[in-house]
Image (tube, helix red, strand yellow):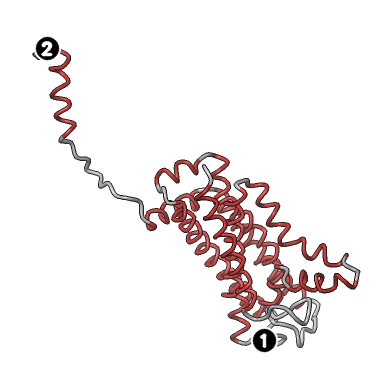
């Protein structure tokens, strides 16, 4: 025998019926890689850190590259036999520190603010989130670096016209090659940031990766350490960047497009480790 329905039951019945037949006009579907890329692009272009870091990098590349060419032209410096576009190296070396900072901030800032929880709730696939960040970051840095390096090289060639010249291969290395290498260095920073999950710590590690080999190498006086000394110099990031401009600190080591292969290996290790740790650790 059932008990009679109360007034409260009679009020709730129609509401339950309406809710059971309600369909949201917003389509419900799993997040795709395209959605993740759109989200990461929105985040990257809407924060001030992107404008400041990449803006400073562009300013350094243009100012140092063009300024050095103007100084040499004013002093009638003889550059015969020297790599024509190597003057752009100074700005790229300093600008790479800006890219390192932005690469770490791309993921480190989400951990510091707790935004990573929202990101992984909207897109539970952690590998997809990291892939989207890598694609957006790499594309942005590559385009900006390549365009800036090209503009700098054009100005240098015009200012020093009649003094220096460069082949098509040298132009490709000093523009597209440099853009790929700096963007790869940013991806390496992104991977380290995902592994460390601490912005200041990851930036410190990456600055050490860039500068420490050349700081340690001069102090390795012992004969037993000569091989280590040569390896640190040849495979240091500043020397590999120099190789893209046709000038290196040693006569051996990576040359032409080889530095890009070295950087590709480092990026693969860092991002692979980042994916493995992201899938194992809690947010």
Q: Residues within 10 Å of mark 2 (few under 14, many from 20)?
A: few
Seen in the image, is 182 located left or right of residue 164?
left
**x then y, percent, for residue 146:** 56, 70
| Drawn side of residue 94 relative to residue 24, left or right | right
Check disc 2 and report the residue beneath it.
3
- Residue 200 or 93: which is nearer the viewer? 200
Tell me the tag on residue 71.
none
**Camera-side residue: 18 or 68?**
18
Relative height, residue 24 to residue 56 (above, below): above
Relative vertical location of residue 188 with respect to residue 155 in this rendering, above or below: above
Q: Going from the N terminus, do you reach mark 2 or mark 1 first?
A: 2
Residue under the point 76% across and 87% down:
81
Residue 93 visible in the shown view: yes
Label 1: element kind? loop
- The mark closer to the camera, 2 or 1, is 2
Q: Quadrant of the N terminus?
A: top left
Please report contact status of discs 2 and 1: CB closer than 8 Å, yes or no: no
Q: Where does label 1 land, which residue?
A: 165
Residue located at (48% from left, 61% from top): 135
Count of picture labels: 2
Expressed as whole percent of the image width and height from the top left, the position of residue 245 reads 68, 77
**Quadrant in which residue 183 is drawn:** bottom right
**x then y, percent, for residue 50:** 56, 53
Mark 1 surroundings: few (<14), some (14-19) or many (≥20) residues within 10 A:
some
From mark 2 to mark 1, how far is it between C-alphas? Answer: 98 Å
Q: Is residue 283 visible?
A: no
Q: Secondary structure at mark 2?
A: loop
Q: Position of residue 278 (x, y in %)?
A: 52, 50
């Amino acid at each position: 025998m059932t008990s009679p329905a109360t007034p409260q039951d009679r009020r709730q019945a129609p509401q339950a019926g309406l809710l059971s037949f309600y369909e949201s006009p917003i389509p419900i579907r799993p997040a795709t890689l395209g959605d993740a890329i759109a989200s990461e692009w929105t985040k990257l272009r809407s924060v001030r850190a992107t404008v400041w870091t990449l803006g400073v990098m562009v300013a350094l590349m243009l100012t140092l590259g063009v300024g050095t060419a103007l100084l040499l032209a004013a002093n009638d410096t003889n550059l015969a036999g020297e790599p024509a576009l190597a003057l752009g190296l100074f700005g790229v070396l300093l600008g790479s520190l800006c890219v390192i900072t932005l690469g770490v901030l791309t993921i480190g800032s989400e951990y510091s603010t707790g935004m990573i929880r929202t990101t992984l709730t909207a897109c539970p696939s952690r590998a997809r989130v990291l892939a989207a960040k890598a694609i957006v970051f790499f594309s942005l840095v590559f385009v900006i670096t390549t365009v800036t390096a090209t503009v700098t090289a054009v100005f240098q060639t015009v200012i020093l016209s009649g003094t220096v010249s460069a082949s098509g291969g040298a132009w490709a290395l000093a523009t597209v090659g440099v853009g790929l290498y700096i963007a790869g260095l940013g991806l390496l920073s992104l991977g380290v940031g995902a592994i460390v999950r601490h912005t200041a710590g990851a930036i410190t590690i990456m600055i050490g990766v860039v500068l420490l080999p050349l700081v340690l190498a001069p102090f390795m006086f012992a004969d037993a350490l000569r091989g280590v000394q040569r390896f640190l110099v040849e495979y240091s990031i500043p020397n590999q960047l120099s190789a893209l401009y046709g000038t290196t600190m040693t006569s051996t080591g990576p040359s032409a497009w080889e530095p890009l292969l070295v950087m590709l290996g480092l990026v693969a290790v860092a991002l692979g480790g980042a994916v493995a740790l992201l899938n194992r650790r809690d947010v």
